[in-house]
Amino acid sequence: MNKNLNKKLVKTLLVFLGYLLYTDFFSTIFSVFGLGNGIEVSFISDLLFFLIIVYIYKDNISNDLKKFLQNYNIKQKIFVIIKYVGIILIINLLLGVFLEFVFPNATNVTDENTTALKSLFELSSIYTIFKILIFATVAEELVFKESFKEIVNNKFAFVIISSLIYTVMNVMYTDLSNQYLIIDIIGYLIFAFITSIAYVKNDNNIFLIILIKFFYNLLPVTLLVIGTF
């Protein structure tokens, strides 16, 4: 039993390290062939990691897809997705209203984040859509939920650990001296916490979480495409 746990621990560690280092790894390889370090390299690096992580967890995804199709009828599928997406949106909306009173100048931070997303979209709309709707919804959830599930059996501990690590990973490359960093932290933590709860309450079904995140991320992508974001 310890041997099996050690294998899972090594697997999770390798997956997580791969997520941390894949960009630098592929960029180094591409630079050797003089391919530079532009948006194309980032796109290819993300795509390669995406294919690798999906291959590693292909059986998990396939099994969870079958369970999702068997255990939920059409109305249940729609309801459970809308429920969790709605909960995240409502909490974020209430949080936004509250933060307007606490940090009245925080709208400048939101504008900077929006500008960054718009800039990426202007450089490559296809890459931006892939990054938000495919990579973030599938690869990131496999890393932060499916991999950690294999080594953290306690549901409460899993929700806390996976949520904290997801949040740290999403803010560690931002400007840590920003006085409004707490706003980003709370936002990421809310999303991670709710989706982790949804994960454990629905028999650790990663396919369901992928769908929830896909439809949650669909809103900003839609706004980007129609030019109102």
Image: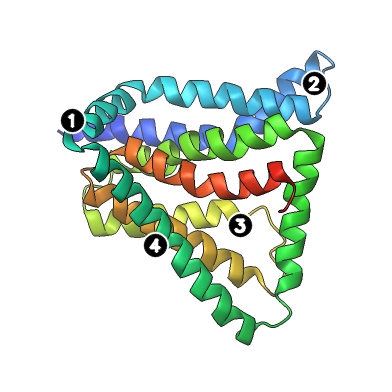
- The answer to which of marks 3 and 4 sits earlier in the sequence is 4
Query: Which residue in the protein does label 4 denote?
Result: 87
- Quadrant for residue 124, please give it: top right
- The image shows residue 32 at horizontal and vertical percentages of 79, 16
Q: The disc labelled 1 sits on which kind of residue?
A: Gln
Do the residues under discs 2 and 4 have CB atoms within 8 angstroms? no
The residues bearing labels 3 and 4 have C-alpha atoms spaced at a distance of 22 Å
- The image shows residue 62 at horizontal and vertical percentages of 30, 23
Viewer-side label of 2, 3: 3
Count neighbours of disc 3 (C-alpha within 10 A) and say few if under 14, some if 14 to 19, many if 20 or more. Answer: some
Q: The disc labelled 2 sits on which kind of residue?
A: Ser
- The image shows residue 31 at horizontal and vertical percentages of 80, 21
Do the residues under discs 2 and 3 have CB atoms within 8 angstroms? no
Query: Which residue in the protein does label 2 denote?
Result: 31
Relative height, residue 2 to residue 75 (above, below): above
The residues bearing labels 2 and 3 have C-alpha atoms spaced at a distance of 27 Å
Q: Is mark 2 on a helix, strand or loop?
A: helix
Q: The disc labelled 4 sits on which kind of residue?
A: Ile
Do the residues under discs 1 and 2 have CB atoms within 8 angstroms? no
